[in-house]
Amino acid sequence: QGGAEDAAEIKIMDWRTHQRQLLPVIATTYAIHYCGAALRAMHRRLTAGDYSILGSLHITVCSVKMMVTSMAASCMERCRLLCGGHGYSLSSGIPERWATFVHTCTAEGDNVVMSLQVGKGMLKMMRDSGESTAGGDVDQCPGTCAADFKDHQVLLQCLQHRAMRLARQLARSQNARLDAGMSPHDTWNADLILANRTGTAQAEAMMVEL
């Protein structure tokens, strides 16, 4: 990997180009770890008889499933590519792990389907709570400059604002189509792209929140 002929081989992580791509993978790994810890904590609450989280549990699990499996598969592929030709070799350990893991992106529901479940779940929660579909485009994102987004709470509020704005937009669109006489099936099918965007936005916000 370069360097003087009589010197030790330079490690991949010593190259700035590789650091730039691998350090985000390490950060993502920590995010996935803490999401798993949060879900385990929720499971312990349920087994202890605390059912107060049942209302949001489906959205949470679908969100984490779609985000974690997609992110992990993408990170594994990134690591394989950064190993060059060695990444194709079974001796690197990456191909076997990738092949064993990547099916989770479709197991128990394709991740696009998961995002639609999240979007539909948000609509239900809005209806159950009496959340208004108005005003979603009026609320302001709290971030005003690049430095603001280094604050975890500001970043979380921005992501939650985006998810709620899309959810309200989806609800308004669904209501308008139903009022115009479209069937429930055709109404939902017409808004699948928006529902996918809504579910993905909520999942990203939830990853930061957990």
Image (cartoon, rainbow, N blue to C red):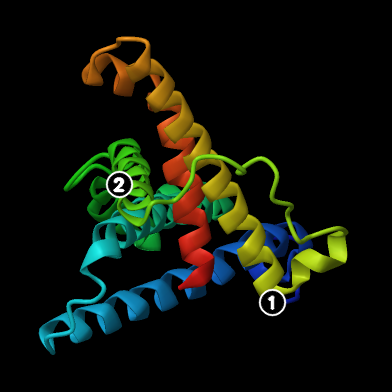
Q: Is 194 left or right of 154, judged from the image as shown?
A: left
Find the distance from the CA under tag 1 to the CA under tag 2. Answer: 60 Å
Front one among 91 and 208: 208
In the shown orientation, is residue 125 left or right of residue 21?
left
Residue placed farthest to the bottom in the image? 48
Q: Residue 122: x and y, percent?
A: 37, 48
Residue displayed at 24% across by 42% down: 106
Q: Mark 2 points at which residue?
A: 124
In the image, 107 versus 2, the foreground residue is 107
Name the image quarter holding residue 56: bottom left
Give, as a three-letter code, the residue at label 2: Lys
Please tell me whether residue 204 is drawn above or below residue 184 in the rendered image: below
Q: What residue type is labelled 1?
A: Ala
115 up-or-down from 30: above or below = above
Disc assigned to residue 8: 1
Q: Tell me the quadrant of the picture where the C terminus can be found.
A: bottom left
Identify the residue at horizontal 18%, vertical 84% (top origin).
50
Residue 60: x, y in percent? 33, 62
> Residue at the spot x=58%, y=53% of the render?
82
The quadrant the N terminus occupies is: bottom right
In this view, the residue in front, 7 or 194, is: 194
Q: Secondary structure under badge 1? A: loop
Left/right of residue 165 with respect to residue 1 in the rendered view: left
Label 2 CA crowd tier, 10 Å (few <14, some 14–19, many 20+): some
Q: Where is residue 64 in the image (x, y as percent from the top left)?
A: 36, 60
Secondary structure at badge 2 equals helix
The quarter of the picture where residue 177 lies is: top left
Whether residue 9 is visible to the viewer of this picture, yes or no, is: no
Residue 150 visible in this rendered orientation of the protein: yes
